[in-house]
Amino acid sequence: MTGRCLIADADLELRSALRRFIEPRGWEALEARDAHEARELLRRARPDVVLLEEHLPGSPLSELLPEWRASHPSVPLLVLSATPSIDGAVQAIKLGAEQFVPKPVEPPGLLRLLEHVLEAQRTRASPPPDTAGGPEPFLGVSPLIRQLEATVRRVLDSDRALLLLGETGTGKGMLASWIHLRGPRARAPLVQLNCAGLAPQLLETELFGHERGAFTSAVQRKLGLLEVAHKGSLFLDEVGDMDPLVQPKLLKVLEERRFRRLGEVEERTVDIRLIAATHQDLVERVRAGRFRGDLYFRISTLPLRLPPLRERPEDIPVIARNMLERLSNELGRPGLGLTAEAEAALCGYTWPGNLRELRNVLERAALLSTHPVLRTEDLDFNAALAAMLPDAPTASPPESDLSLTLREVERRHISRVLAAEGGHVGRAAQRLGIPRSSLYQKLKSLGLSARV
C-alpha cells in the first residue's frame, strides 16, 4: 500500500529523514515548511495522506484541520506533536485528525501507520470487489462473449484508457463497473458522467469544477468529477457526444494529468483511469469534424466491442434466468422461471434495446403475471418497445418475415433503429445510412414519429 504523502513540518531534518526513508519503499514525498506551502501542495498535488505538525508556522491547528477536512474530506490527516498531551490529542481528533502522533517519530513505525490509515481510507471509499454484488457482464456461452471476457481480463491491470463500443443497452456501464471493481483502483472511487446532451459550460463544470464567481451562477466552489475520481476511475458514457469545445481540455488531462477549475489560474494534478463508452462510430465522427482525431487515438488504444443480443441468441436463456433470479429477490417472488416456449420466444426476438429491453420485458411479466413460471403470453414485446419510444408503433413478437409486406418490413426496421437510438432522428438516420431529411420523409409516409 503506497501513495503520496505531504509532510508539513518546519523541521527540515525531520522532513528529509522521512523522505529518505519512505521514497525507496514506493511512496512519493512532498515537503512543506509552513501553512502557506502546505495549502498550495494540498490543493495542487492532492496527496493521499498528510503529516501535519501541531504548531506549523502560518496558521493554528484549530484553523487548518477544519479547513482541510472540509476541502479534502477523504485525505487522512495525521498530527505530529513535539509537546504531546491528552487534551491536545482529544482536541486534534475532534477537529478532524485521523491520528495524533508524539515526536520523536521512528520512520519504520510511521511508515506502518501511513500504510494502515491509507488502507483504511481506501476500504471506506469503495467496497472490496468480492462483495460488490454487481451484475455479471459475461453471462452466456457464445464465442463472442467468451472472447470479450478473455480480452477484458488481459487489460484489467493496465492503466491505459479503455473505449467500450456497443449499441444502446448492451451493458457498457455494467462492464465499466466490473472492470473498475476488479482492477488495481478498486478501492478508490468510480465516477460516472453521461456526456450526451450537456451544454459545453455544464459539461466543463461537471468535469473540472469551478471557483466561486467563475460565472454568474457560481455562488460557491464546486469540486469537479476529475477531483472526485482521483486515484480511481472516470467513466464517460456517450463520449462521442462530448462538445468539441471540451474535448481538447479532456485531452490535456489524459496527456499531462493536469487541469484547471473554471475561474482558477493554478493547475492541479490528477491520477485517473479513463473508461469511455459510445454507441456511435467515432471514426465517422472524426471524419465529419465532430470529434478530435488526437482524442480518439488517445482513448481508443484498448477498444472493447460489446456484441448486441441479436448476434448471440444462444446467450439469451442464461441472461434471462440470471435477470429473473435478481427480479425474484427484488420483487419478493421466489422461484420465477420461464417455459421452454417463452425462452424460444425470447431467443427469436431481435432486441433493438438489448439487455435493457430484455430486463424491461421480464420485469413487466414478473409484475403482471400470476404464474411463477412465465409463459409466452406473459411476454409483452409491444410494451417494452413503447417504453423505449412512446410515439413509435408497437413491435410484434417473432414471426416469419415472409408474411410481411416490404412497407411493413421497412416500418418495423425503422422503428427498431429509432428505439435503439432512444428516438434521436439524427443518430437513427446515421445508422440507417440515409440523410436526416430522408428519414423524416419516411417517418411521415409510414405514420411514425419520434421524440427528437
Image (spheres, rainbow, N blue to C red):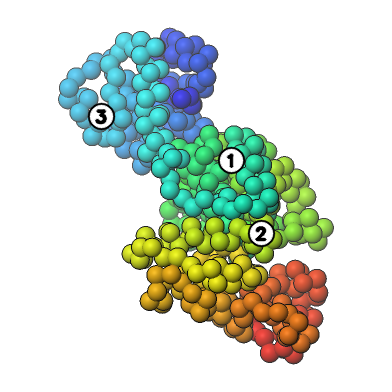
State which tag comes first along the sequence, 1 or 2. Answer: 1
Label 1 crowd (10 A; few <14 / some 14-19 / many >=20) = many
Q: Nearer the viewer, residue 319 or 80?
A: 319
247, above or below 320, in the image: above
> Which percent across, then down, holds residue 67?
35, 38
> Residue 12 lies in what quarter of the image?
top left
Q: Secondary structure at mark 1?
A: strand
> Callout 2, which amino acid?
Arg
Indicate which label's residue lies in the foreground, 1 or 3. Answer: 1
Q: Which residue is mark 3?
A: 92
State which tag comes first along the sequence, 1 or 3. Answer: 3
> Callout 3, which amino acid?
Ala
Residue beneath the point at 48% across and 67% down: 338
> Callout 1, which amino acid?
Arg
Residue 292 visible somewhere in the drawing: yes
| Count of picture labels | 3
The extreme front residue here reads 340
Q: Quadrant of the C terminus?
A: bottom right
Q: Which residue is mark 2?
A: 312
Q: Give the Cα distance between marks 1 and 3.
A: 35 Å
Indicate which label's residue lies in the foreground, 1 or 2. Answer: 2
> Residue 439 lies in what quarter of the image?
bottom right
Disc ID at residue 273: 1
Residue beneath the point at 68% across and 38% down: 255
